[in-house]
Amino acid sequence: MSIHQITEIGSWLFLIYGLIICTGYTFAAIFSFLEIRDYKRKNNFQAEFTLLQSSNLPWISILAPAYNEEANVVENVRSLLTLNYPSYEIIIINDGSKDATLQELIKTFEMESEDFYYHPFIQTEEVKGIYRSKNDSFRNLTVIDKVNGGKADALNTGINISDKEIICCIDVDCILESDALLKLVKPFLNNNKKVIASGGIIRVANSCIIEDGRIIDVKLPNTFLARAQIIEYFRAFLMGRMAWSHLDGLLLISGAFGMFDKDTVIEAGGYNHNTVGEDMELLVRMRKIMREKEVPYTVGFVPNPLCWTEVPQKWKILHRQRNRWTRGTAETLWMHRKMLFNPKYGVLGLLSTPYWFFFEWLAPLIEFVGIIYVVLLLIFSSLDLWVYLIFFGVVYSFAVLFSITALFFEEFSFQQYKKPKYIIRLLGTILFEPLIYHPFVMWASVKGNWDLINGKKSWGSMNRTGLGNKRKA
Amino acid sequence: MKDLIKNIIESSDWILKTNLILTGVFFCVILGFIFVILYLRISKILRNQKIEKYRNIFSDFITRYLFDEKEVSLEAVQAFKQAHIKHTLGKRTAIQVLLIFEQNFNGEANQKVKELFVQWDLKNYIQRDLKSEKWYKIARAIYIASELNLKSLAPLIEKHIDSEKDELRQQAMLYYIQLSDNSPLEFLGRIKKPLTRWEQIYIEECLKSNYTGITPDFSRWLESELNSIQSFSINMIGEYNQFENIPQLVPFLSSESPELKKETIHSLGKLGYPDLVPHLLKMFKNEPPAVKSFILKTVSNIGAIDDLITFEKMIPKDDWVSRQVYFNLTNFREKDLSLSSL
Amino acid sequence: MQKILIIEDNPMVVKSLEFKLSRENYEVVVAKDGREAMNFLDLHSFDLVLTDLMLPFISGTQLIQHIKETFPRTPVIVLSTSKQENIIMDAFNLGVDDFITKPFNPNELSLRVKRSIRKFQ
């Protein structure tokens, strides 16, 4: 077969793949527009804070695993204590930290060890102790000390201990809006179908001014890397999740902040500690079970920024994170490969899982192969440069279009970045993101797959600078 | 460059042509979005400035109208209207500001706010919105009508009480509750769509904060066809201490629905029904773990420690949920956590 | 002229209180949160403090405690949306002199202000 024929086939495949992506993008844009517009209309007149006096709002257990967080854990817990919701408890699970995390908590919140009765509804590592506070102001705080077992294991321990109906799994260093719990619990109470989980929009907290555990001022980060991630989060939340929620095909609720129906979680078997993508894997499994039981259910999504988290600002740490995400996605898809294209699972089988397979997991690999192919052709054949420029042009302009659409939705909905100059800078970031950020992330994904095949299983560490550094002078 | 383009156009390779066209299309849409983004941002900034200005002017005028010893004349009110409340933005801001005043003050000041609302012709504006096709305009108008106690608009709001659109239905229900003198929940007999928990919470809060008439007898709706309304009634009987309705609640202890059972146990517990513990003792064995743990929590709140121990003997060996709950109840200091766990 | 410190973040309520109370010959100073209030308290002495309980930065209870400790002869009136009994009881236990729930009657408020100031003179 001649080079020309290979190129022809390659171009056809590229075109088909591209057309599918374009169609997906168009639908995502339409659905997101409808969801956001609907949400704005529903929420622009009556304030919900009057409900906060109600004693009929369900109890929520916030579960926050902590590992080696001695620098920030007290600060984070203090922030959680100020949430505006009448009936919630905080359970911090100390996952065998090697530093003074537990001691800091015990000291600051006047905690003392108590007798406990622990039944492992889900199997976990051993629980060494349960602490509650002597001080009445902290009576809704519980600390569990256990043998190290990883994030999934820690969350499962919290699930076992909680006796409430609804659990909220968070990353301990996320900052929640003060009415986040009220907003996130609404889908559970306002639906005639059973709601098994709900999630919201996650925002980037880097460079924001934080005081007393609240975001006081939203600022655009100075580093290109953080800004590129902001754009990426816009795409993921304002278009991706919104569209999937419209179709009721959401496969992932962010591990940073998500609410679940505890009984369904236990029935599904809790978090799986054999994968690094435990947040996605749990939701997929929960959805599968509900489908198999043939009970009408849904997953809620609240198009409101409820949680702020710190994103990596160093390339090396970003690589580790994306490497892990790729391994998690691959592991989850493999575990649930039965669902792919399986009409028994409805939207999940016919749309969601195929999408994740082709366009989240496979895409970086295809891109990588495509780039190598193009480079090789360029070097070894005499085909014109401008052919490649045209291909490059199409891909680049589409990438920019996608990001700009996401930025438009941000403008249409929340405008969290108040200063016009921030928008200009974000526009600039959008122009460079496909050239610098995207290839890096793609490489991290490819490497992730490579590492997975070679048996790598760990989480790696995340260098957190902590919330405490961001005080106003 | 020109040669390049000529080359491409003359080339028979249609894939390249397609890609080029697509690039062109994307590029145009990008420019379009950039324009829209900047336009949205700038127009929002300008609009917010205008709103700020209006809010200041309006609140100054309203403050004078409410609190100045010198009465503000009718002419002044009309002149003000002519000057500032002609267009939609002015009207909407005026309504917003009036609402804030109305929600913070009662008594004479509150009455004056309502007068001003009518004198500024805003009632007509609301009426027009109520006749609109768009549900969100109607919902907002109903909300304003309930806050400002506009009884005359009831006929227009009537038909939305069982609307398909949840928000519309909720606002209509809240309107009826706030404006009713003695039968705020009369609509419960008419609606066909179930009442969600969220709506129930809103209705309860509205009854407690905004309704000023006689408390209705909730047992009226115990026989409703809708489970949600039954559940709501049972809950409210307990919440409002309607002791006289205890006999009607007792049969629900043997209801088929675990939700209704729990709700009944909760309410009877709150009302201090003396035969509750013996009843629970009889039913305990046959209940699923979820109801068992709920019974334990209730007994812990209303009964003596001996009662709790009696129940403990009946917990099956493998019902870990109930065992864990029992342990926490007998060891944990806080008892008040339990009863609200519905 | 008697001086009143008002801590309230709702601009309409602030405007109304300022208007009404200055007509009754009080000098009104407004703080929009607990921190500003602390600063003002350091600079002036007040004949009465009127405050909400839900304040950003410093909680209402902390502020009231501080006032009662440093200026025991300054009456404090709480103006709050909260109708919960336990919150009202807590406030009185801190030494608050009066508690007014929103929505409130401005005429009644001004009477209570007069009464509270008179009690301490």
Image (cartoon, coloured by chain):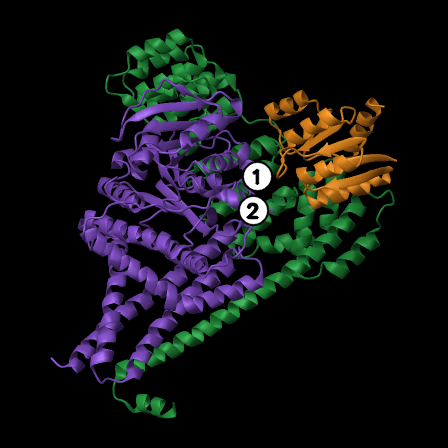
Chain with colour green in the figure: B
Chain with colour orange in the figure: C
Q: Give coordinates of residue B177: x percent, y percent.
A: 57, 36
Kindly identify the residue that appears in the image at 53 percent across and 25 percent down.
Answer: A137
Give the labeled residue for mark 2: B157
Disc 2 element: helix
Q: What shade does chain A have? A: purple
Instruction: Name the one closer to the observer, B275 or A361.
Output: A361
Q: Give coordinates of residue B90: x percent, y percent.
A: 68, 58
> Is label 1 on the same chain as label 2?
yes
Kindly identify the residue that appears in the image at 53 percent across and 63 percent down.
Answer: A423
Which chain is mark 1 on? B
For residue A91, side relative to residue C70 (left or right): left
Q: Give coordinates of residue A152: x percent, y percent.
A: 30, 38
Mark 1 or mark 2: whose residue is earlier in sequence: 2
In the picture, residue A60 is in which quadrant? Answer: top left
Q: Is residue A171 above or below residue C97?
A: below
Give the labeled residue for mark 1: B176
The amino acid beneath tag 1 is: Tyr
Q: Residue furthest left?
A: A1
Q: Are marks 1 and 2 in contact (CB under 8 Å)?
A: yes
